[in-house]
Image: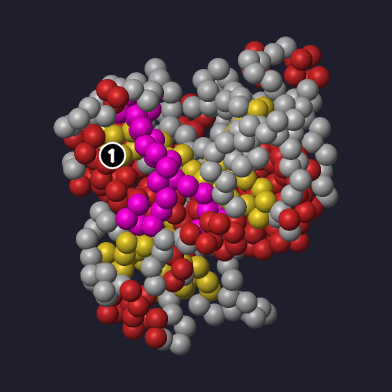
Amino acid sequence: MKDFSHGIQYTPDNVADVGLGTLKVEELADKGISYVRVQWVDFTNVVRVRVVPLSYFLKVLESKRPGFGVAKATFGLVHLNMAPGTPSAGEYLLVPDLSTIRLCPYAPGHASVLGWFEEKSPPRGSNSVETSVCPRTLLKRVLEGAKESEAKFLVGMEHEFVLLKNADPVEPINYGDWAASNALPGGTLEAAVLQEIADSVQASGIELQLYHGEAAPGQFEIVTGPLPPLEAADAIVHTREIISHTAAKHGLRATFAPRPFMTSCGSAAHIHISVHSPKDAQKEPEVLSPYEKSFLAGVLAHLPAIPALTLPTPASYKRMFDGAWSGGTYVAWGAENRECPVRVVNTGSLTSRRFEVRCSDATANPHLAFAAIVAAGVSGLQTMQELEIKGVESPQTPGTMSEAERKALGITQRLPLDIQQARQKLQADDLFVNLFGTEFMEKYLAVNKLLGDILTQDADEAQALTRLVKFY
């Protein structure tokens, strides 16, 4: 078969050769950095921060065990409400991960760093300070487990958001159209803000691939390049911080809410992931390789449980409908088919073929989302699981097919249709129960329920939307 490959070929090796764009500690003073923003991301995907003078940060690094004390309640706190089981006493140690230092162009003189949560001392009967509630540690553990399958992964992200002139009542900055130039008219505030965001992303050492206007009022999209999963999740946190803070600098609010306007499309966080292994070198156009098939089979097998982590709010399910280009509601995949929750992108291209997971939005903690997706895929690779679900060929979509047609392709399950179903699916999935552990599952689900209750407490729809966009 003739090879019509196209697109840039990213591999774990050439991405590593380019570098991650992060800074070294010894470069900070020369870069004019006076403050370090020590950051972490909680279960509700809120970025929390301590701003530390560089002089004190350097002293901490010279100490016997560098770190910052953070109340254990940080993983149970939602809008000053405490989830059941949240301890009122005790602290974790947030250990800076110096490989994550990036410039913060939205705050001149500032750099940011993420970290690992650890116990201050090992619990009784243990020699380990690792804690199961740290999202970055959880993703790292999943990736270490993937080494047995000799597979590596690259992940890229589409960042969709809406620029608002006002949050109460909610008012978009403009009314453009998908990829239309009238979404970014020259000389306007929105055009200046988007360019400043684009410049800042690149100044932070993150690859920017493009930006454009999206289909909803005031909606835009930033696309960033692929990185290994942990580094990709870290870069997503930084990119969203740039978007939010740059908008605020200009008197606007950037919201990542899943669907602010029910008369138009919503905002997703589509995850693009490619599978790489020396054992899977002989790939063919239009045919998934053995590793790709088994990875996809694993993801599909656990896809009903994944939305509890990738679509974690009640509002997330206002976006997920059949016929809305959101990925639909059936456990299915298809080549270039946007009505499937997993789309194979560039099926015929050996240089740029990848999977796009469409059932994800920016209310999700990216480290937890990636941990779930990679763990599911790796479970398929560990047994070289057969791909029993057949791809849905365009122009067909699972939502428009008859039950008999879906069954013929092996499409027999639906995704959860609300957050309550999603929690139940997660609790019933043995892979995730065993992987995440009892402590994480109990705490995450308690926080997730409290978050849902807080976001749905308003009877008035306009006030509910204002609450949502102020949170996300």
Q: Name the quadrant containing residue 12.
A: bottom right
Which one is in front, 374 or 17? 17
| Residue at the farthest left position | 187
The answer to whether one can see residue 405 in this image is yes
Q: Residue at x 32, y 55 (%)?
A: 203
Count of numbered marks: 1
Instruction: Work out whether 296 lies above or below 133.
Output: above
Magenta-colored stretch includes residue 230? yes
Instruction: Work out whether 56 lies above or below 470.
Output: below
Q: Quadrant of the C terminus?
A: top left
Q: Quadrant of the N terminus?
A: top right
Instruction: Work out whether 194 lies above or below 67.
Output: above
Q: Which residue is mark 1?
A: 194
Which one is in front, 38 or 188? 188
Instruction: Work out whether 396 lies above or below 240.
Output: above
Residue 133: percent from left, percent from top: 55, 61
Residue 425: percent from left, percent from top: 67, 39
Q: Residue at x 25, y 54 (%)?
A: 106
Q: Which residues are magenta?
A: 202-231
Is residue 380 found left or right of 199 in the rendered image? right
- The local secondary structure at tag 1 comes to helix
| Residue at the farthest front position | 2
Is residue 313 found left or right of 170 in the rendered image? right
Q: Residue at x 59, y 71 (%)?
A: 130
The answer to whether one can see residue 361 in this image is no
Residue 394: percent from left, percent from top: 64, 18
Q: Residue at x 40, y 46 (%)?
A: 208
Residue 286: percent from left, percent from top: 71, 31
Which one is in front, 16 or 235? 16
Dot 1 surroundings within 10 Å: few (below 14), some, or many (20 or more)? many
Magenta-colored stretch includes residue 136? no
Q: Amino acid at mark 1?
A: Leu
